[in-house]
């Protein structure tokens, strides 16, 4: 060992490759993330209820404070899974597959909620629960991709065996993200075009924008808490699997030794 | 208030769904924790175990 390797400092991401170290960090972060996430979500939603009603949509604009954060998270969670897929395929980081597998059900729930809140907003404002326009259809495809990945990551007897397959499918599915984002520009949709993340700045008045941004931040932090909890559980699940297999092997060789 | 049903449905269903997700994740966590504790009680250890897992699940 030369001096440079002896003193080389591991990067933060590399240090987290040790599951026990990762669990130690998760233990410390989860209570804080839960508390801060709940507080910010409450402030955002209460602020949304105190904000003025929309001059066209009336009170139904209150649905926006749920619908927009859920739609944002539906896509962001898939972005997290895409990064995790790269972590598995490029760096073979041991936590990356755990992150991908743990995020999939949470992303699917946020996608369903984005579709549901959009539907109960669409009925009074558009006159229909559902329309097969490009934005709604591409979000529905995202939901189907989540379901496929949930099934794939749980399809093998050994947890984590499908890591590479799931990573490849995740990368292919990531093609859908720009389609969702730009669907409202590329096609003629009933869904409105972007009004928050757009060139030229948001078109929403500040009185409605700040509660929306605070609620979105709150839900995002709550996702982080849920994701870390699910990842820690997944590490424990894999430990239980390994320990049971080793116990079975030991029992087996003991029987053979006695015979 | 107009359209009260739609707004209430959005908030109530969202709260129930997210609450259900959190409950499922916590239930899964507790079940795995019990399994690990049981394996430790019956004397099973990982090779790399130096009481580290026990400390984690306490």
Image (spheres, coloured by chain):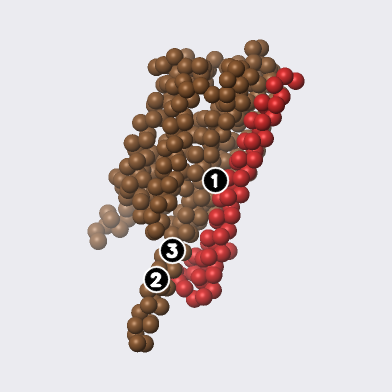
Chain colours: A brown, B red
Secondary-structure class at tag 1: helix
Q: Nearer the viewer, mark 1 or mark 2?
A: 2
Q: Name the residue nearer the viewer: A174 or A130.
A: A130
Farthest residue to the left: give it: A2
Choose the circle earlier in sequence order: 3 or 1.
1
Q: From this view, report whether residue A40 is shown above or below residue B44.
A: above
Q: Nearer the viewer, mark 3 or mark 1?
A: 3
Q: Residues within 10 Å of mark 3 (few under 14, many from 20)?
A: some
Choose the circle earlier in sequence order: 3 or 2.
3
Residue A67 image point, x, y percent: 57, 28
Q: Name the residue nearer the viewer: A206 or B30.
A: B30
Farthest residue to the top: give it: A55
Separation (CA) of disc 1 from disc 2: 30 Å
Image quarter in which the N terminus of chain B is found = top right
Q: From this view, report whether residue B54 is shown above or below residue A164.
A: below
The residue that label 2 is drawn on is: A246
Q: Give the quarter of the image for residue A238.
A: bottom left
Residue A81 image point, x, y percent: 41, 41
Residue A150 image point, x, y percent: 44, 45
Choose the circle earlier in sequence order: 1 or 2.
1
Q: Name the residue nearer the viewer: A222 or A179.
A: A179
What's the residue at 35%, 79% (across, down)? A253
Separation (CA) of disc 3 from disc 1: 22 Å
Q: Chain of mark 3?
A: A
Secondary-structure class at tag 2: helix
Q: Can residue A199 be seen by looking at this rendering? A: no
Which dot marks residue A226? 1
Q: From this view, report whether residue A259 is shown above or below residue A84.
A: below
Q: Chain of mark 1?
A: A
Q: Are marks 3 and 2 on the same chain?
A: yes
The residue that label 3 is drawn on is: A241
């Amino acid at each position: 060992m030369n001096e440079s390797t002896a003193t080389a400092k591991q990067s933060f991401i590399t240090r987290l490759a040790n599951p026990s170290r990762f669990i130690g960090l998760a233990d410390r972060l989860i209570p804080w993330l839960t508390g801060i996430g709940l507080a910010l979500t409450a402030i955002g939603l209460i602020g949304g209820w105190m904000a003025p009603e929309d001059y066209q949509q009336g009170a139904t604009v209150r649905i926006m404070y749920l619908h927009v954060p859920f739609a944002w998270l539906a896509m962001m969670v898939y972005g997290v899974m895409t990064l995790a897929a790269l972590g598995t395929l490029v760096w073979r980081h041991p936590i990356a597959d755990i992150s991908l597998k743990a995020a999939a059900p949470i992303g699917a729930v946020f996608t369903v909620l984005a579709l549901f809140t959009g539907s109960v907003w669409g009925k009074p404002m558009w006159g229909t629960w559902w329309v097969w326009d490009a934005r709604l259809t591409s979000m529905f495809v995202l939901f189907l991709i989540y379901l496929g990945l949930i099934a794939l990551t749980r399809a093998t007897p050994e947890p984590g065996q499908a890591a590479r397959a799931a990573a490849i499918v995740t990368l292919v599915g990531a093609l859908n993200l720009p389609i969702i984002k730009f669907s409202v520009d590329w096609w003629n949709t009933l869904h409105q075009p972007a009004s928050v993340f757009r060139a030229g700045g948001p078109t929403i008045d500040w009185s409605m924008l700040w509660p929306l941004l605070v609620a979105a931040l709150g839900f995002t932090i709550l996702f982080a808490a849920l994701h870390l909890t699910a990842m820690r559980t997944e590490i424990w699940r894999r430990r239980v699997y390994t320990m049971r297999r080793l116990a079975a092997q030991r029992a087996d060789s003991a029987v053979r030794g006695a015979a | 208030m107009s359209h009260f049903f739609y707004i209430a449905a959005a908030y109530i269903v969202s709260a129930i769904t997210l609450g259900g997700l959190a409950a499922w994740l916590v239930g899964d966590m507790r079940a795995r924790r019990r399994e690990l504790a049981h394996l430790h009680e019956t004397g099973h250890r990982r090779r790399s175990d130096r009481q580290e897992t026990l400390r984690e699940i306490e």
